Amino acid sequence: MSFLSQAEEAIPAEVHMISGCMDSQTSADVSNVDSFSLPDPAGKAGGALTSSLLKVLYADQQKPDADLSFQEVLAGVRSSLDGDYTQIPQLSSSRPLDVESPFEIVPPHATGTKRALLIGINYVGHSSGVLSGCHNDVLNMVEYLKDVHGFEDENITILMDDGNHTLPNYAEIMAAYRNLVEESQPGDAVFCHYSGHGGKLVDDDGDEADGYDETLVPLDYQTNGQIRDDELYTTLIGAMKKGVTLTCIMDCCHSGTILDLPYRFKADGVQTQMEEVSDFEFAPLVSLFKAVIFEKKSLKDALKNQDPKVLLGQAKKLWKLRKRFR
C-alpha cells in the first residue's frame, strides 16, 4: 500500500495544522501585541504564533487581490517573529499539499457549516506556569473568524479559565473534541485553536522516533495528566469524517508533531515543498485489525513487518484510554 493510500485510510479528513514551533523548541509569549496591528488586541499579551499569524492574515485582507499561499503565510509568520523569537513555524497535513496553493480556512468546496473550537489556558490560580496571553489569543482569533470568514456564535465553542466559559480541564477538552467530531459532517469547514502550555512525555508505546510524546497541558494536568498526541490522533484526527476540512492552529511549546500528521513543511528558509514524514507510524494496531477483519488476512500474514513491541505498547495505551473515558 502506498504512503498516500495509508494516509487516506488512517486519516479520512483533509487536515492542515500550523504549529508554533518544532518539537524541540518552545513557543514564546508576546508581552504587548500592539505592534502586531490587530483590529482589537483584546489585551496586551498574546502568543507569538497567534499574534503573528493574525498580523499576516489581516494585512493580506487589505490587499485588492488577497490570496496568500500556505508558504507565504508561514514565511510571513516567520518574518514577523524573526529577530525576537527563534521558533520556526511548521505546516503539517493529512495529504500532500502544494505549499504554493492558496491558504484557505474555508475552501470553496466546504459549503457546509463553519464550526470552531478554541481553547485558551492561562492557568489561573496555579502557583507556577501562569500565562497571560492565551485568553487574548482566543478572543482575537474568534473576532477574525467571525469578521473575515463568517463563523457564527452558535457554532463556536470556547474553553477558557476566565470564569465565564467551560473550564479547559482534561475531561472537558477531550469531550469538546469528541463533540466536534460527532457534529461535523462532510462539507463542513472546521477550525481548532489551542493556546496554552505544550509539553513532552516519554513515549510509552514505541511509536515516536525521538522517544517522546508531544502533549497539551490542560488546566488540571497535576491531577489528571497531560493530553498525549496519541489521544488527539485517536479522538480528533483519525476520527474526523471524510469530506471535512479541518484547520488547526497550535500555539504552544513542542507542537511540531502534536497532531501526528504524515506530511510536513518547515518554514526554515531551506525547505521548499511539503515532504512525507519518513518515519511516520500509521496506527499499526488499527491496520492489523483492518487486515484481519476486513481484508481476511491470516493473523500470521497480517503481523508481517509489524513491530510486536509497538503493537503491545499501543494495546496498553488503548486500554488505559478506555478506562479514562468509562
Image: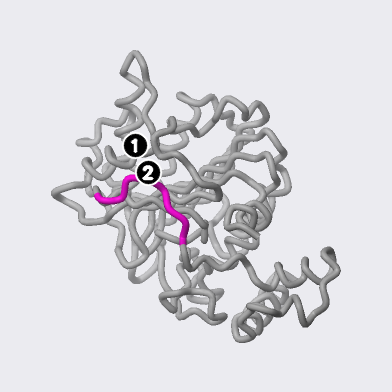
- Asked whether residue 309 appears in the rendered view, the answer is yes
Q: List x then y, in percent, for residue 182.
A: 73, 48
Quadrant location of the C terminus? bottom right
Q: Is residue 255 above or below residue 93?
A: below
Q: How crowded is mark 2: few (under 14 residues within 10 Å), some or many (20 or more)?
A: many
Is residue 196 left or right of 321 when viewed as pictured? left
- Residue that appears at 54% across and 56% down: 167
- Residue that appears at 62% across and 64% down: 171
- Residue that appears at 64% across and 46% down: 13
Task: Check the image and name the residue furthest to the top.
Answer: 64
Q: List x then y, in percent, for residue 7.
A: 60, 55
- Asked whether residue 143 appears in the rendered view, the answer is no
In the foreground, 293 or 120: 293
- Per the rendering, the mark at residue 73 is 1
Residue type marked 1: Val
- Residue that appears at 18% across and 47% down: 82
Badge 2 is on which residue? 136
Q: What stretch is highlighted in magenta?
A: 270-277
Counting residues from the start of the chain, the first of labels 2 and 1 encountered is 1
Q: Is residue 170 above or below residue 118?
A: below
Would residue 271 be counted in the magenta stretch?
Answer: yes
- Per the rendering, the mark at residue 258 is none
Element type at mark 2: helix
Would residue 111 be counted in the magenta stretch?
Answer: no
In the foreground, 143 or 302: 302
Task: Check the image and name the residue furthest to the left.
Answer: 83
